[in-house]
Amino acid sequence: MKTTYSGHQYALQPNLLHDIKAEAPNEVLVADITYIAIAGSSAYLFLITDAFSRMIVGYHLSDSLAHQGAIEALNMALEIVPEPEGVIHHSDRGVQYCCHGFIDEIRKWNLKASMTDADHCAQNALAECINGILKSEFYINAEFQSLRQASNAIEDAVFAYNHLRVHGSLRGRTPAEVHYGHDGTLELWAKELVSFTLPVPLELRHV
């Protein structure tokens, strides 16, 4: 299901990641929205991932695509950002991220808004990949019986992804290990942001 509507009249922000790469945690946050199936209904998962550590730092499940879900995810992410001023928030051109309500929230925290260029979803590849990992490896692509059931499953999936799922691009470490134990040596904003090659160990697949 399509979650991005970019045919709106709101102002667009430039893509700041053409010339900038994350060199430490809390420098670049990438955001996206993915569809969650609910029996007889639907829901939408707003996600924010740290571009350096690949840790999911903010998320919110909503039965609406309204921008309030993006704000909730952002506020969760900023709870662990020591100094929000100057942090880049990167997203696609969806109306949720371009509307006045969300841009006002960005300005309130003195963040820098960044967006993909027209028709370039690959410029938000990391955020898209996180969606895929959660759905394919942590089973949030199932149809849930209620919003509460989906919310509980997503909470478990995010925890398992952050703390148990190792990445080859993180030198065999988990996102949480890199995020909270940054040693300054990893180069993570590579040309191939989609190189998630290590599977979740079998014993973790039902976490």
Image: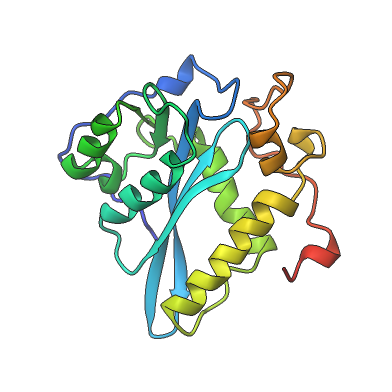
**Residue 119 visible in this rendered orientation of the protein:** yes
Vertical comparison of 36 with 7: above or below:
below
User: At 48% from the left edge and 85% from the top edge, which residue is drawn?
Assistant: 145
Vertical comparison of 151 with 112: above or below:
below
Residue ranking furthest to the top: 19
Q: Looking at the image, which is closer to me, 21 or 116?
A: 21
Vertical comparison of 127 with 148: above or below:
above
What is the x, y in percent for residue 147?
42, 76
The quarter holding residue 53 reads top right
Query: Colour scheme of this structure image?
Result: rainbow
- Side (left or right) of 150 relative to 207: left
What is the x, y in percent for residue 89?
40, 33
Tell me the quarter of the image containing the N terminus.
bottom left
- Side (left or right) of 61 relative to 163: left
What is the x, y in percent for residue 81?
47, 34
User: At 41% from the left edge and 33% from the top edge, which residue is drawn?
Assistant: 90
Count of residue discs = 0
What is the x, y in percent for residue 134?
61, 58
User: At 65% from the left edge and 25% from the top edge, which residue is drawn?
Assistant: 190
User: At 56% from the left edge and 33% from the top edge, which residue is drawn?
Assistant: 51
Vertical comparison of 80 with 147: above or below:
above
Q: Looking at the image, which is closer to me, 193 or 171?
A: 171
Tell me the quarter of the image containing the C terminus.
bottom right
